[in-house]
Amino acid sequence: MMIWSVIDILICALVVALAMAALYAPALRQRVMFFIAFGLVVAITWARLHAPDLALAEAIIGAGLTGAMLLMSLDHTSDMPREPASYGLRIGSAAMGGVLILGLMMIVSSLYPIHDGAPTLAVSQRQVESGVSHPVTAVLLNFRAWDTLLELAVLLSAALGILNLGPARRSCGHAASLTDGLARVLVPLLILSAGYLLWKGAFAPGGAFQAGAVLASAAVVIHLTGWEKLPRVGLRSLRLLLLVGPTLFVAVGLLPLLNGQAFLQYPVELAGLLILLIESAAMVSIAGMLTLVYLGGHPHANWPIELVNPKEPM
């Protein structure tokens, strides 16, 4: 126990140190590297807090996809030296940050223990009705499915906004023998890992969000490698890719209304199958949305001309 306590203290100190380094490192590239390392250590922190679902999401998105997006943005950003802030401004910022941290610590300490076990007890009592054996999946896809549907709607709104930003950044990768060989191994493994996480989410940490993020990572690897010979996704296919998850989610939620039940109140005997269908479609849409976030624009170079001229290949 003593060893783990020391490790936890070191992890907390490392999180704070990396956060400070990500904010105040002299070079922009250094700040990006520190931010990626910060995401990895935060993922370890979630794992130590016995929250493996959050640890997976943080490692894949917070460090992986976000790190790749920031690294790609460095090629389009000049590392201009910053003017040093005045001494008074730095002292004021440090004092304000200290007050906020102290206030948050007092609030968190006043909430301890956060609950007496009643929320987890309520979930365990109705676990059989959820259709899955993992409590997190039961809450996100059944008992609190409304929240997950709204999260998908937020991601869809972000993706639609990105589509209107203009063409995506061009790939700076090239099909060298080393990177090409590595990508040919990584991409199939990432696709298989996404399928495994999707299936595993019914009874263990995983699910659509983590699986979709891994699938988006495969798209990022393809983009970085510069495989130009792959078939291009048409506009109709792209729209279908983004809409299939939220649309199927809403359709499944409307089905119980035909039997006089509430929205998203699945039949107990079909709950497991319906959750699997929702997660499968959501995984595909989440992968497309996160890939668009990484690309930073529409994947077609002549966008929006393709919409104006319907004779263009879709």
Image (cartoon, rainbow, N blue to C red):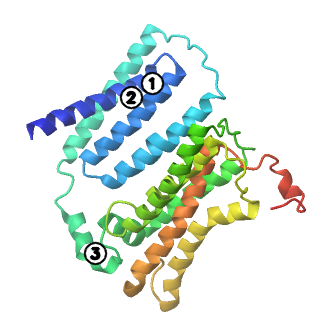
Residue in view at x 71 percent, y 39 percent: 170
Q: Residues within 10 Å of mark 1 (few under 14, many from 20)?
A: some
Disc 3 + disc 2, Cβ < 8 Å: no
**Residue 73 at x, y = what percent?**
61, 33
Give the farthest residue toward the bottom. Answer: 259
58 in relation to 255, above or below: above
Quadrant position of residue 77: top right
Disc 2 + disc 1, Cβ < 8 Å: yes
Q: Amino acid at mark 3?
A: Gln
**Residue 306 at x, y = what percent?**
84, 55
Q: Is residue 267 left or right of residue 229?
A: left
Q: Which mark is residue 194?
A: none
Q: Which residue is mark 2?
A: 19
Q: Is residue 201 visible?
A: no
Q: Which residue is mark 3?
A: 127
Q: Secondary structure at mark 2?
A: helix
Q: Amino acid at mark 1?
A: Leu
Picture quarter with the N terminus: top left
Q: CA distance from mark 3 to mark 2?
A: 39 Å
Q: Amino acid at mark 2?
A: Ala
Q: Secondary structure at mark 3?
A: helix
In this orientation, which residue lies closer to the viewer: 241 or 24? 241
Q: CA distance from mark 2 to mark 1?
A: 6 Å
Q: Is residue 37 left or right of residue 182?
A: left
Q: Which residue is mark 1?
A: 23
Q: CA distance from mark 3 to mark 1?
A: 44 Å
**Residue 124 at x, y = what percent?**
23, 71
Give the farthest residue toward the left. Answer: 2
Residue in view at x 56 percent, y 44 percent: 181
